[in-house]
Amino acid sequence: MDKNRFRRSVFRVTGLNRERLLNLLRRRGIVLYDVRETGEKSMEFSLPARQEENFFAITASLCYNVEKIGERGAFALPARLLKRTGLLLGAAAFVLGVCLGAGAVFSVDYYGSGAVYKERAEAVLESCGITPFSFVNEKTLEKAETEILKREKAFSFVSVKKRGTRLKVNLVLSPVPPDIVDTERTALVSPVSGVVESITVLRGAALVQAGDAVEAGDTLISGQTEVKEEIFETYVLGSVRILAEEIYEYRGKDGEEDAARAFAEAQTEHEIAEIAVYKERAGEEFLYTVKALCRITVK
């Protein structure tokens, strides 16, 4: 009997335009249950465990933070027990560790790109002696961050932090190199909303100038040009630099402004012209909101 038929995986997804993600999952045949909003940018839902692999494949290239937070169903508990060899012995060791000191780790949670690519980091963490029901210190965590960045070139930012008895691992993929200029385009369109900083036109007609506010989807350079009262269409060749604000959130301890700033710098694939960090308490942690004014080159 396929026990996955009776088991559902529960996920928390954080990001913009959540309705677009839900529609995409439904079109791809992913069955969703118990969909509910848990915050301004977050939602939770469950899906059949047998569709979990397809779900990760669909969301791998999308700009959402995906976190698996649990399982439901008749076989959820047995499935979790079978995944951990010696779970009872580990639990007993953990209880003893709590009595002996504060270095015990009960579980490891993955955030950011780590929700999808955690397998790449797990092997490195294990080599550093970091597993559920293990004991760690700050030196071990710093070594783990260094080793993940050293061995896995796909990541540009790694954060391994201990919060109580849980270890939080945040992974950010390296930015994808920009595409080669397409000289067949008949219009250069802004991908973001912001303010034009500068514009260079080698072919085509400029429809904006420095200082203009633009919205995502606005045409910046048109391939239509007028010569002696006649309209000709050609490809566009040029570039426009736009200043656009990007906002990132980082959770951590008090005094981690530099870590929040580094997290935002690793997340964006654009040059940062200005950056500001704002902090507010969120339960036992602090929520850092990082506002980065990015210089985006459209070409």
Image (tube, helix red, strand yellow):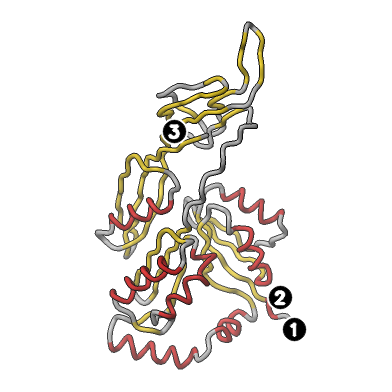
Q: Which circle marks residue 206 in the picture? A: none
N-terminal of the pair, mark 1 or mark 3, is: 1
Q: SS at mark 3?
A: strand
As measured in the structure, the alpha-carbon distance from the residue carrying label 1 to the one carrying label 3 is: 57 Å
Mark 1: which amino acid?
Answer: Met
Determine which residue is flagged by label 3: 242
N-terminal of the pair, mark 3 or mark 2, is: 2
Quadrant showing the N terminus: bottom right
Q: Position of residue 59 (x, y in %)?
A: 59, 58
Q: SS at mark 1?
A: loop
Tag 3–tag 2 contact (CB < 8 Å): no
Q: Is residue 109 above or below residue 135?
A: above
Tag 2–tag 1 contact (CB < 8 Å): yes
Residue furthest to the top: 228
Q: Position of residue 172 (x, y in %)?
A: 45, 59
Determine which residue is flagged by label 1: 1
Q: Is residue 166 above or below residue 114?
A: below
Badge 1 density bin: few <14, some 14–19, many ≥20, Cα 10 Å: few
Mark 2: which amino acid?
Answer: Arg
**From the viewer's perspective, is 92 left or right of 103?**
right
Badge 2 density bin: few <14, some 14–19, many ≥20, Cα 10 Å: some
The label nearer to you, 3 versus 2, is: 3
Q: Nearer the viewer, residue 215 or 220?
A: 220
Residue furthest to the right: 1
Picture quadrant of residue 296: top left
Q: Nearer the viewer, residue 132 or 180?
A: 180
Determine which residue is flagged by label 2: 5
Q: Position of residue 51 (x, y in %)?
A: 67, 67
Q: Nearer the viewer, residue 44 or 196?
A: 196
Mark 3: which amino acid?
Answer: Ile
Q: Position of residue 241 (x, y in %)?
A: 44, 32
Residue at point 48%, 91% (across, down)? 88
